[in-house]
Amino acid sequence: MALLKEQKEQIIKKFRKKELDTGSCEVQVALITARILELTEHFKVHKFDYHGKQGLTKLVNQRRRLLDYLKNKSVDRYAKIVADLQLRK
């Protein structure tokens, strides 16, 4: 269920701000979004995985908190990450 190392590295390269950046808000939101999408596909097959749904809810809440922080810190960065990940329509 976890992201493969190559997938994770690719996401980090796309959203990092500088060379060794692996923990900025943008990178964290992108990684969490990838995990959420992966879990969403899992739940299409396994509808009664209630413990997994609890983990999915925690991930969604964590992403929401990071996005709220980013929105308060820098609206431009928030708008860019939301557009890149297509989170709002």
Image (cartoon, rainbow, N blue to C red):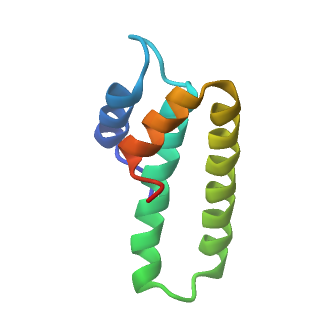
Q: Residue furthest top?
A: 19
Q: Which x, y percent locates residue 15?
A: 39, 29
Residue nearest the observer in this picture, 11 or 52: 11
Quadrant in the picture for the N terminus:
bottom left
Quadrant in the picture for the C terminus:
bottom left
Name the residue rendered at 35%, 39% in the picture.
5
Q: Which x, y percent locates residue 30?
A: 46, 41
Q: Is residue 9 left or right of residue 54?
A: left
In the image, residue 43 above or below residue 38: below
Name the residue rendered at 68%, 70% in the picture.
54
Total marks in image: 0
Residue nearest the observer in this picture, 31 or 71: 71
Name the residue rendered at 64%, 81% in the picture.
50
Q: Quadrant of residue 73?
A: top right
In the image, residue 3 above or below residue 38: above
Q: Which x, y percent locates residue 46?
A: 47, 84
Q: Is residue 83 left or right of residue 36?
A: left
Q: Which x, y percent locates residue 64?
A: 65, 50
